[in-house]
Image: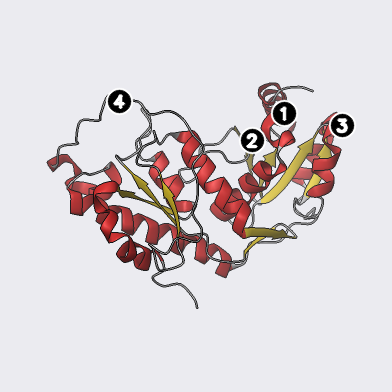
């Protein structure tokens, strides 16, 4: 089986060669709220299509593809059609998501994808994400960001999104040189300490990086969401608080991990504010429907 880099490059070249000039083909698109979104995004005047191809890890664990698809559907405009391009050995994946992707195309028949994308009437199984589901995702994000801004202000330890125009007036703390071992985050879904039906993860002794945030948001998406005709429905609000020692950041995009966590329903709270967890948990649920 071809690796994702080859498949992405091959499909990008094919689409750029065969689609009319009005179409923009973006491989591995960068979305501010997603650590990983669709493999290609194809935008035209009348339709936008997101193309997914199973990653090696997603072939081993289909829940990873499910989570990536769910978060992408919530982050992208509700009308974006999602297509799965699967190789011959991806039969079980294609079968599992047969009713969720608008269309599923075999890699060996990829030449037909251009026609599929240009045909704006070829909805397949596509359904727009309902406004209330998109609205809930926006509320979760706003509440998580509000908690992190409050945590930042109370400790006078800013991340760049926390203070907006005031960030330049405040000095960032020097990060500790001590490196903690990598481990998969554990999520406590029955903790009495939050009192507001908010999950808890203790990460104050861990290095919070892209893989940690990805584990948090994917685990949450898989646990709480189910797919019905490509629409993600939550059994309960996927809300969580992760206790950390310092704000996570990436060298080239300091806000990416903060924003991605918030969109996945997670708020980071600095360990020195541990006693305020019930207050933060209550804020996480502000504006939620009963």
Q: Which residue is mark 4?
A: 178
Dot 4: element: loop
Q: Nearer the viewer, residue 36 or 27?
A: 36
Q: Which comes sooner in the sequence, label 4 or label 2?
A: 2
- Residue 113: percent from the left, percent from the top? 79, 38
Mark number displayed over residue 88? 3
- Whether residue 19 appears in this view of the structure is no
Evaluate if marks 2 and 1 touch, with contact meaning CB atoms under 8 Å apart: yes
For marks 1 and 4, give the one nearer the viewer.
Answer: 4
Which of the image's four quarters has the N terminus? top right
Which of pointers 3 and 2 lies earlier in the amino acid sequence? 2
Residue positioned most to the bottom:
290
User: Which of the 4 image quarters holds residue 49?
Assistant: top right
Nearest to the eye among marks 3 and 4: give it. 4
Left or right, 150 with reference to 182: left
**Is 61 situated above or below 48?**
above
Tell me, yes or no, whether the two marked residues, 3 and 1, touch with CB atoms within 8 Å: no
Instruction: Identify the element where label 2 is drawn.
Output: loop
Question: Which residue shows up at 63% across the image and 58% down it?
Answer: 225
The answer for how far apart the CA atoms under marks 3 and 4 are is: 46 Å
Question: What residue is drawn where x is 52% and y is 40%?
Answer: 214
Q: Earlier in the sequence, mark 2 or mark 1?
A: 1
Q: Describe the element under mark 3 as helix, strand or loop.
A: helix
The span from disc 1 to disc 4 (Cα, nearest Å) is: 43 Å
User: In this rendering, would 252 be left or right of 260?
Assistant: left
Q: Nearer the viewer, residue 64 or 19?
A: 64
The residue tagged 1 is 11
Does label 1 or label 4 sit earlier along the sequence? 1
């Amino acid at each position: 089986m071809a690796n994702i880099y080859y498949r992405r490059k091959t499909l990008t070249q094919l689409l750029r060669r065969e689609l009319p000039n009005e179409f923009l083909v973006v491989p591995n698109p960068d979305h501010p709220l997603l650590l990983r979104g669709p493999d290609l995004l194809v935008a035209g005047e009348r339709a936008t299509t997101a193309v997914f191809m199973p990653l090696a890890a997603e072939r081993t664990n289909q829940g990873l593809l499910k989570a990536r698809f769910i978060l992408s559907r919530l982050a992208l405009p509700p009308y974006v059609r999602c297509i799965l391009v699967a190789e011959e050995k991806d039969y079980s994946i294609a079968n599992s998501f047969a009713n969720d992707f608008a269309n599923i195309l075999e890699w060996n028949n990829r030449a037909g994808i251009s026609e599929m994308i240009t045909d704006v009437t070829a909805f397949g199984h596509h359904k727009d994400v309902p406004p209330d589901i998109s609205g809930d995702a926006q509320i979760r994000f706003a509440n998580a960001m509000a908690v992190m801004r409050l945590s930042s202000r109370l400790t006078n330890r800013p991340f760049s999104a926390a203070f907006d125009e005031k960030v330049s007036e405040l000095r960032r703390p020097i990060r500790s040189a001590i490196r903690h071992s990598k481990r998969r985050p554990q999520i406590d879904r029955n903790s009495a300490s939050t009192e507001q039906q908010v999950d808890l993860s203790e990460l104050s002794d861990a290095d919070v990086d892209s893989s940690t945030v990805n584990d948090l948001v994917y685990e949450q998406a898989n646990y709480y969401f189910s797919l019905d005709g490509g629409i993600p429905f939550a059994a309960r609000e996927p809300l969580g608080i992760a206790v950390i020692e310092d704000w996570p950041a990436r060298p080239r995009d300091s806000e990416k991990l903060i924003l991605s966590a918030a969109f996945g329903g997670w708020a980071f709270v600095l360990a020195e504010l541990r006693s305020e967890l019930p207050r933060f948990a209550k804020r996480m649920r502000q504006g939620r429907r009963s």
